[in-house]
Image (cartoon, helix red, strand yellow):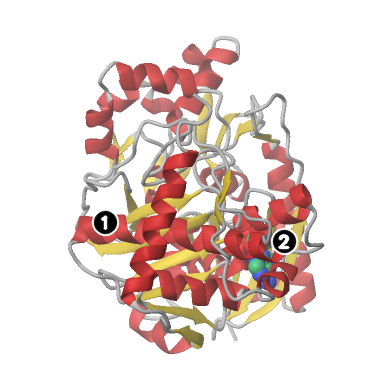
Amino acid sequence: MKYILALDQGTTSSRSIIYDENLKAVATVQKEFTQHFPQPGLVEHDAAEIWESILETARGAIAMAGIKPSEIASIGITNQRETVVVWDRKTGEPVHRAIVWQDRRTGDFMSALREGGKEPLVQQRTGLLLDPYFSASKIHWILREIPDGHARAASGELAAGTVDSWLIFKLTGGASHVTDVSNASRTMLMNIRTGDWDADLMALFNIPRALLPEIVSSSGNLGKAVPALLGASIPICGAIGDQQSALFGQLCTKPGLVKCTYGTGCFLLVFTGSDAISSANRLLTTVAWRIGDQPLQYAVEGSVFMGGASIQWLRDGLGIIRSAPEVNELAARVNDSGGVYLVPAFTGLGAPYWDSEARGTLLGMTRGTTSAHIARATLDGIAFQVADLVTAMEKDSGKKITTLRVDGGACASNLLMQTQADLLGCAVERPSNIESTALGAAMLAGLGAGIWPNIETLAKIRSVDRRFEPTIMARDRRARLKMWKRAVKRSQKWAS
Ligand code: ADP
């Protein structure tokens, strides 16, 4: 039996999973790490702690599986995207805490670029919109913050990268400074059509090429873990950003296939094959993956900031449930939300609105409104936001989506999934294994190591747990979506 070690480096925890060659998870070890919030709007991680948490969980998973390290054919990495680490190449020590994707410190810098008319260039080259979310402005900020940052970057003394790049550097004992092309596509420094760093963008953010990793495929030969770390010299054959990994893990490998991950936020991605389709509806164009020396593959992406997080708000903010799964019980006490709408714009609205000044809004309450209606409106609010993304995607492609593949913690809610099918008017399909993110990285690592000859051989490994079909009339759907639109309007530009 051959095994694969998947390293899933998320925003709040690191996980290591050992899969066998039938993609059955035989051991999982997870560890949370510290979130640093130096000021409101600022989010940092200690990159050394991230590395230690990955190493510890990887060692733990190997021990738990009861296998020899030499039986692991390949390592696959998937990671929180956009978060940046800058480190000293010689010592391997970070020169600043990692700046996390959620961090808004470079908002003014990005607004200035937008006002300076730079958005069309950036969108055309990278498929992204000017927002502090992406890596470039965070690297720019670190180089200005540390002593002689620019000079040390230009001379090659420093190295920068997203979390995949950092982990591969550490795993290979500093031998490989690389990044996978899906992660690189989220930095705002790569031309997504050529798959190379873009000179104009590096100039715009004042980031020298000498600082940046080499861009490599998501599946292939990415380096070898040094034996002292995990007990054997294990090849690293897969690396991919978390959302692209979930897309691959759901086997959305034919153009038009769509997945939505319902985690803290919700991430909808449609695979578009070798076409990089520009969105006219403020969705992002991104690299899905590149396998070996095959052509670059693309996706269009839309994200919602408050997905499962709005259920957490019911628990921690309102205190009307004690645990996330309880939302289903409470919401099921009523047949509908009784005309209540919750727009969970607590941190603004993501695609397709991109309104950072929108705020959470609860509308339509009467004397008859109960906590059950609010719970139901919360589940509806998640499904409505995803429906807005699907509508934007359908407008871009001119094609109706027929099935939505779902994963992530909140897709466990049958009520949410049924509501989603009703609001979309299409089937919602939940696989038996909803851990698509780690699965995708394991699949890419296995393909890279030659455990399976091609993607087709993986298809039989995927099985469906449940399909949710729409149960409401088109007229009702339109009426509900119209009310939702009115509610969104009320929430917009509230903080400005
Ligand atoms: P992340 O990877 O973003 O941390 P997960 O995929 O682990 O997120 O999903 C966690 C989210 O799922 C939480 O926000 C929680 O509110 C929600 N969640 C977990 N279990 C359920 C459930 N049974 N019903 C509804 N929501 C749930």
Q: Which residue occupies the foreground of this view, 352 or 199?
A: 352
Q: Residues within 10 Å of mark 2 (few under 14, many from 20)?
A: some
Which residue bears the numbered disc 1?
A: 296
Q: Position of residue 420 (x, y in %)?
A: 46, 70
* Relative image position of residue 242 (x, y in whole percent): 51, 56
The quarter of the picture where residue 474 lies is: bottom left
Identify the residue at horizontal 45%, vertical 26% (top origin). 137
All told, the count of numbered labels is: 2
Please say if 7 is above or below 107. below
Q: Residue furthest top?
A: 148
Q: For the point 77% across and 79% down, which residue is it?
A: 66
Q: Spatial distance from mark 1 to mark 2, Cα to Cα?
A: 48 Å
Q: Nearer the viewer, residue 243 or 478?
A: 478
Give the foreground label among 1 and 2: 2
Numbered tag placed on residue 181 in the rendering: none
Dot label at residue 371? 2
Ligand 1 sits in quadrant: bottom right
Instruction: Give the image location of residue 488, x and y in percent.
Output: 44, 46
Residue at 37% across, 35% down = 188
Q: Amino acid at mark 1?
A: Leu
Q: Kindly state the secondary structure of the residue where label 2 is placed.
A: helix
Residue 92 can be seen, yes or no:
yes
Instruction: Note whether ligand 1 is within 8 Å of mark 1.
Output: no
Provide residue 365's location: percent of width, then percent of height: 61, 53
In the visual, does 22 lie left or right of 31?
Answer: left
